[in-house]
Image (cartoon, rainbow, N blue to C red):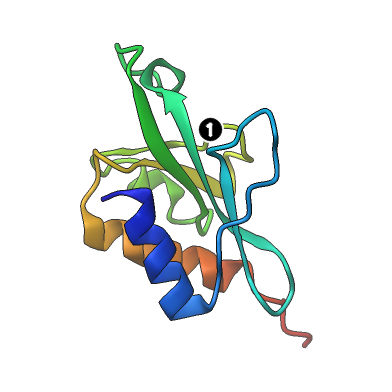
Amino acid sequence: MNRDAIFKYAAEKFGAKPEYLWKRYPAYAVLRRADNNKWFAVIMNITKDKLGLDSNDEADIIDVKCDPLMIGSARMSDGVFPAYHMNKEHWITILLDGAADEMIYTHLAMSHDLAGSKKKK
């Protein structure tokens, strides 16, 4: 999986286009919901040691929102880690070259849903 495939999927499925918000990190991109402007994904390039891996190689990751009840089981999947640079109770990090494509798309869709407006009771 690569970031271009994620951007294409996000544009087709959710109408979301990447936003590059930081001059210091020109490769970091945010995907937002169109209806409420909330982030549902952040794509970054970091060194693998920041994920606890024994490597200084650079890799693309995606941070996505995750149901707190599912985070423990999600982290047991290949390529899934505690959130890098986000709230670890509500976000996970997925290594793009370490996880199955379908799993990435599933978590991206779940993140989009979780970032939606809360329904009033």
The amino acid beneath tag 1 is Tyr
- Compared to 42, does 44 lie above or below? above
| Residue 72 quadrant | top left
| Relative image position of residue 89 (x, y in whole percent) | 59, 44
How crowded pointer 1 is (Cα within 10 Å; few <14, some 14-19, many 20+) is rated as: some
Numbered disc total: 1
Q: Residue furthest bottom?
A: 121
Question: Residue shown at 44%/49% (left/top)?
Answer: 71
Q: Which residue is mark 1?
A: 84
Please name the residue shown 43% across and 61% down the image. 7
Q: Please, which residue is most extreme toward the right here?
A: 120
Which residue is at 43% across, 79% downward? 13
Q: Nearer the viewer, residue 28 or 72?
A: 28
Question: Relative to 51, does residue 95 appear above or below in the rendering?
Answer: below
| Front-most of residues 64 and 68 | 64
Spot occupied by residue 119 in the image (x, y as percentages of width and height):
72, 84
Using the image, determine if residue 32 lies above or below residue 13: above
Q: Quadrant of the C terminus?
A: bottom right
Q: Is 53 on the left or on the right of 34, as rendered?
A: left
Residue 4 lies in quadrant: bottom left
Question: Element type at marker 1?
Answer: loop
Residue 36 horizontal/vertical position (percent): 74, 74
> From the viewer's perspective, is 21 left or right of 25?
right
Q: Nearer the viewer, residue 64 or 17?
A: 17
Describe residue 51's horizontal placement relative to residue 120 as left or right. Answer: left
Residue 45 percent location from the top left of the image: 46, 32
